[in-house]
Amino acid sequence: MIKRTAIFAGLSFISGVSFSGNESKQDPDRPNFLFLVIEDASPYLFPAYGNTDIETPNLDKLAEKGVVFTGAMANAPYSSPARSSLISGSYATTYGNDWHRNQHIVPSQYFFPQYLRDAGYFTVNAGKTDYNVTREVQRAYYDLAWDSMSGYHRANQPNVSYNDPERNGKPFFAQFNNNATHMSRINSVSIHLREPPRLDKYKVELPPYVPDLPETRSDYALHLDGVVDVDKWVGIFIDDLEERDLLRNTIIFFFSDHGGCLPRGKAFPYESGFAAALIIYAPPAWSHLLPAKPGTVSDRLVEFADFGPTLLSIAGVEPPEHMQGKAFMGDYAREERKYAYNFRTNTEDHFDPSRSVFTKDFQYIKYYTPYRIHGLRQSYQWAMPAQMAWDSLFHFAQTKPEHEHFFMSKPREMLFSRKDDPFGMNNLADDPEYAPVLEELRSAASMHIRTSKDLGFFPRDIRDHFVRKGISLYTWVRENDYPFNELYKTVEVAADPPVEDIPFLTEKLAHERPEIRFWGASGLADLAFNGMLKHIPPELEVLLGDDFGSLAAKAAETLVYAGETEPGLDALVAMSWEGNTFATSSLEQLGERVKPALPEIEKLAEKSPDGRIRFNCRSILINFGMLPIQELFTPSQVKNFNRQQKNRVRNWAPSLP
């Protein structure tokens, strides 16, 4: 018993596990729900999806009596917005908390477990409350959703279990999290400063969307080690449920929180970022609820936003009207989805929104700032040796054509065949044969941002303005007759602006709403980037003094694209000294155009009081060979990575039975 508790502590965020309780009181008419959630793992990592590099006997056991989903989609390709969509039963963009690693205010209706709790379920959250909400929201609303939890303000309750004595025979919903596959296991700056992979890196089969480099192979092999560790963790739960006669009445959802952490996976809007492994096991008494026969594979499209409504439906609770997800099991199951909707908003300080639509056969991506590159550096992903190696290969060596696009401006749209091209290597958007599909999915994306009242087009500093005032943006737009249609029209014109729309975009520069001003400037930036803005509107220069740094930086970036290099760069450098991270993001995006500002950027990299400004400026210097890529991180950051790795070896490789 002590050994099992120690294993739990090592493989998840759980500090301890209680093994007590009276199960004879279990309600036979309502099942228990167990979420076993892992991190940063694409379906192709798992034998249940065809991987032959590793074995996962416990997950195979779940698959043999459950359903493996090939159409399960995280609504976002990174953790906090994906989990925000999961816990709310709605799109995080609707609530405006889709900006990864930023805190927002949401209304009390937000957390779906509260509806299970109201229906008599005992609710447990062990170890992950990554929902992009403020501490105030946590303190105000977490008690509505959870009977027992660990983390955040519940630090005085470290021992979390579905067997809590207070459960007293109630059916339970329990969510446990394991981080053995998290990117932090791979992050170390150097492959020589972390645990070596147990698998032979030269024998694993890499996905084709990454270059075949020693660092990529090492990262991937270590990532697969994490999947093997996860399988052992799952086995502990299966054994415990069987021993306690709970498995016969427990439906298990095993899933990853989004795609894997090889470069161009997590954080990016491809299937390799959105697709989640999902296996749903149901015991014989409840197998009739599964959307396919036990032991089979289903291509049904399901989203994270659907999970909450599905649990409520199985429990006999009608999902509340505000939930946007569709139940796919139980009394209130809806018709099968034709489309799955996804979003991407940012990576750290880089605001680069896109929207995606999946069908069973295709993935469509709409980019709203196509002139921006994916390869703008951010501190977390670039600590992976594979990402650093690919970066260096592009900037200072020779990259294959299929691996160049990550560091170049994007097409306005992408379309991939999921069956013929599951790794998204061949863009069909310009192929006349697929024009009807392109138009259908373009329309679906456009309609969805409107019907979902998408707030993901607000820059971070505008959202923060509401948070500082203690206002929920979700509530504010509904109480103030917000001009959604005007925002979306401006965004869509800005994403693909014809010269004829310069007057329209210029008019938006003086709009009363700052996010609409931003998209007016972004449309002009696109035109200038492509050499189509022949005259600079005076309203753009006025925007340099806007109260919101995102707008001022976008105006200055546009000036540089339009040939007003000196005033544009001077403005961006001045903003950077003031701590405007949107400005340093613009400087990095400008590429060769930034050369005249390199002496000032070098000073910023050394002397700025803001660590994010220093990081972004070091990124620029690396592009010009003025720093080696290993100096992207400061010595103290490297030391911290190394210290964390020593702890991770102990936590992720315990002595397992």
Image: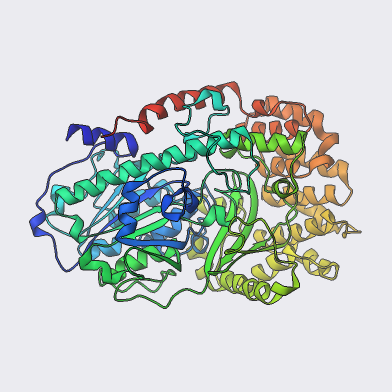
* Residue 470 shown left or right of residue 154 in the figure: right
Location of the C terminus (image quadrant):
top left
* Residue 74 shown left or right of residue 409 in the figure: left
Residue at 25% x, 32% y is: 6
Location of the N terminus (image quadrant):
top left
Q: Position of residue 90 (x, y in %)?
A: 44, 65
User: From where the camera sits, is residue 176 visible?
Assistant: no
Residue extending furthest right?
Answer: 534
Residue at 70% x, 40% y is: 584
Closer to the camera in the image, 641 or 500:
641
Closer to the camera in the image, 367 or 3:
3
Q: Is residue 197 above or below residue 585?
A: above
Residue at 86% x, 35% y is: 596
**For the image shown, how many numbered marks are present on the structure?**
0
Q: Position of residue 195 (x, y in %)?
A: 46, 27
Q: Is residue 277 above or below residue 407?
A: below
User: From where the camera sits, is residue 318 visible?
Assistant: yes
Q: Is residue 226 above or below residue 502?
A: above
Q: How was this image coloured?
A: rainbow
Q: Position of residue 489 (x, y in %)?
A: 68, 71
Closer to the camera in the image, 306 or 318:
306
Q: Position of residue 18 (x, y in %)?
A: 18, 41
